[in-house]
């Protein structure tokens, strides 16, 4: 069996793609896999690091505001379609899988024109324009939320959930072990704050600006991932020097971080939410306002409707976020209710379901 996995741009697309690839290889060891990404994007580094081959397309996204970059977009699309056509002609895949991101558009479009079955893996509760267009000719659409027939043909939707990293799925780390791993007091209540690998300015400002609150609540400790883009600034802040604050550039061992936390404060990316459901953590979500179709707000609202998380708007976070997290720490009953509700939304067998769909669609 041969398969092409296309897409990327963010960890929310790349990590599910790698999880799918690993699961496919585990199911059929002689399977041939090829990734197709966008030149200059993070998948060109992360996918080879995971042990898979990747080819880049000269594709880019449409800028929401007027910029000269948009003038070159039609030429990049044509060049990407031509390169995707040659890749598919030479590789001869049995199935093409799109995980979202710029590169999935040209690859799935060419595959569909050539009569090769395609599978879309839509992580979010609000589908993007590319996936909506591609879904018309897709053999199957794997989704993580209900009510997705608003965007896709109902007879091709399979509710699978999102792929979760194996290390998180199989973690048996206790609260105390997680806190000890980060050099924290194993018996103190802990809040985990993170904004993805690059960080999130709003979340960082929400911590750094609440110096008095952090000083007064020495009974609570913080694991604060500021992100690569912000580390130089925030690691030198007064908040980062406090004994109850552990400031980190990046957390690779997220299984340990989740285990250590009583409350998680984070953005509302689809992969993050799927992980929170599996680990069953009380969370306060701050959707990024800078993503296409405002899909993080839709993701967070889906959890809030199920009483499985709390949400604070980005423009209110700086003044409210840390106090809300500490108030939640003081309300153990509310933490328990949030944990119970979010666990009901977990789909730990998502990757097996997605792989089964891919193999069925491929005819292999």
Image (spheres, grey):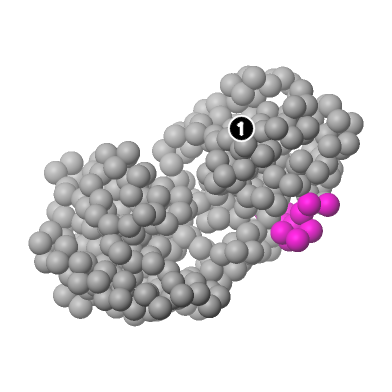
Residue 309 in the magenta stretch? The answer is yes
Inspect this view and state whether residue 319 appears. yes
Q: State the residue at coordinates (68%, 38%).
A: 234
Residue 318 in the magenta stretch? The answer is yes
In the displayed structure, would residue 40 be above or below residue 127? above
Magenta region: 306-319
In the displayed structure, would residue 73 be above or below residue 26? below
Total marks shown come to: 1
Where is residue 132? Give x, y as percent. 42, 76
* Element class at badge 1: strand
Where is residue 166? Give x, y as percent. 41, 38
In the image, taking residue 44 as reference, residue 164 lies left or right, namely: right
In the displayed structure, would residue 167 be above or below residue 271? above
In the image, taking residue 306 as reference, residue 94 lies left or right, namely: left
In the displayed structure, would residue 73 be above or below residue 263? below
Q: State the residue at coordinates (79%, 58%).
A: 316
How many residues crowd mark 1 within 10 Å: few (<14), some (14–19), many (20+)?
A: some
Inspect this view and state whether residue 116 appears. no
Image quadrant where one finds the N terminus: bottom left
């Amino acid at each position: 069996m041969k398969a092409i996995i296309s897409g990327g741009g963010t960890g929310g697309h790349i990590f599910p793609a790698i999880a799918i690839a690993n699961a496919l290889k585990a199911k059929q060891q002689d399977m041939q896999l090829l990734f197709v990404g966008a030149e200059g994007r993070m998948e060109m580094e992360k996918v080879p690091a995971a042990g898979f081959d990747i080819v880049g397309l000269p594709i880019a996204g449409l800028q929401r505001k007027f910029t000269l970059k948009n003038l070159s977009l039609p030429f990049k699309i044509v060049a990407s379609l031509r390169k995707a056509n040659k890749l598919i002609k030479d590789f001869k895949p049995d199935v093409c899988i799109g995980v979202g991101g710029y590169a999935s558009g040209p690859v799935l479009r060419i595959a569909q024109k050539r009569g090769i079955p395609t599978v879309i893996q839509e992580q979010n509760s609000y589908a993007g324009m590319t996936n909506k267009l591609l879904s018309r000719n897709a053999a199957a659409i794997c989704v993580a939320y209900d009510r997705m027939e608003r965007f896709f043909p109902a007879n091709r939707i399979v509710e699978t959930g999102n792929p979760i990293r194996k290390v998180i799925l199989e973690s048996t780390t206790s609260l105390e072990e997680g806190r000890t791993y980060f050099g924290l007091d194993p018996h103190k209540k802990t809040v985990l704050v993170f904004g993805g690998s690059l960080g999130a300015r709003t979340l960082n400002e929400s911590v750094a600006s609440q110096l008095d609150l952090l000083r007064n609540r020495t009974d609570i400790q913080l694991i604060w991932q500021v992100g690569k883009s912000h580390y130089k600034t925030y690691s030198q802040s007064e908040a980062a020097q406090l004994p109850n604050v552990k400031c980190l550039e990046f957390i690779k061992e997220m299984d340990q971080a989740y285990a250590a936390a009583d409350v998680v404060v984070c953005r509302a990316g689809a992969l993050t939410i799927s992980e929170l459901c599996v680990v069953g953590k009380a969370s306060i979500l701050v959707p990024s306002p800078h993503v296409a179709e405002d899909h993080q707000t839709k993701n967070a609202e889906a959890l809030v409707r199920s009483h499985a998380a709390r949400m604070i708007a980005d423009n209110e976070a700086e003044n409210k976020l840390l106090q809300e997290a500490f108030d939640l720490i003081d309300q153990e009953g509310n933490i328990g209710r949030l944990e119970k509700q979010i666990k009901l939304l977990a789909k730990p067998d998502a990757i097996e379901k997605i792989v089964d769909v891919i193999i069925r669609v491929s005819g292999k």
